[in-house]
Image: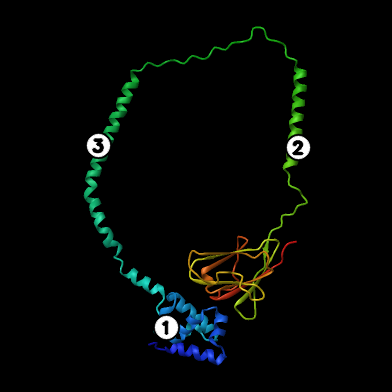
Amino acid sequence: MLIVTELGTRLKEARLSKGYSLDDLQEITKIQKRYLMGIEEGNYSMMPGTFYVRAFIKQYAEAVDLNAEELLETYKGDVPGAPNEQVSQSISQIPSRRKLTKGPSNRMMESMPKIIAALFIIVIIVIMWILWQSKSNAGTPVVEDKPPVMEYDKNPQPIDSDKEQQDKEKLDKENASKEDTDKEEDKPEEDVEDVKQAISPGTIEADGETTSYTLTGTDVFKLRIEVSGPTWVGIRDQSKTELLADTRAYNAGEVVEFDATAQNYVRIRLGNSANAKVYINDELLTYAQQRVTQNIVINFNKEQ
């Protein structure tokens, strides 16, 4: 038997006062209807995890104009604790560094005399080896190096210095001409301009959760969304048609890729934007606002 919590009752009353049905709320928040019913009924066991319980409650509250943080603080006894509380409890159970390192330190002190004795023996062996090498080298006769004997042409031929100079100048001119030709071939065409894509600064729309950007200077529009934690990802066109086949909540390590070159308008819906990085043609998009749930609209002015 389900027990309806006060938090669920308050959210449901706010929804009804707005005149929203659960289907309407599902369209606004992109949260599945069964999860919305679970929040109103206090049935959190059906949620994907503790993070999603709090995130879905926040999205629900924002959709019906309630203060999400105030609700979570007021009814924190009804909502499962955040994951960092479990981490804190685990850390408190870890033994202190002093206790862990006490044993190895004592063993090191006990073995120190043995280490010193071993080093002393090694030093004696090295000294003896050096003395032996010095004695062996002392008995080896030194072979005197003789300078090589230089042989000279007894009948040198006269050199035509003028002809040699002319040949040298001719060769230098040919090499210079070849270098100029190579430089001309390697030189890039001056008429070709290096066009680089540009993404305009984001403009926050009137609804507060939508930011619009404009992509110019390119004829390619490829999206890549790297997810570092649980977040909802959806992609639509201007007619609200879903472009992403797998619209759902993604987990850490997953990557969403979509080629939007054929589109001139794309809207990206992020359930938890802090856990998602959006790349446009491998260029990281800087968010204009730090909302948990937000829409990112890209207007694509394709380079002709």
* Numbered disc 2: secondary structure: helix
Label 2 belongs to which residue? Answer: 181
Quarter placement of the C terminus: bottom right
Mark with earlier residue (1, 3): 1
Quarter placement of the N terminus: bottom left
Where does residue 238 sit, x and y in percent of width and height?
67, 74
Q: Nearer the viewer, mark 1 or mark 3?
A: 1
- Within-10-Å neighbours for mark 2: few <14, some 14–19, many 20+: few
Q: Amino acid at mark 3?
A: Ile
Mark with earlier residue (2, 3): 3
Label 3 belongs to which residue? Answer: 121
* Numbered disc 1: secondary structure: loop
Residue drawn at point x = 76 percent, y = 37 percent: 181
Q: Amino acid at mark 2?
A: Thr
Label 1 belongs to which residue? Answer: 43
Q: Is residue 257 left or right of residue 77?
A: right
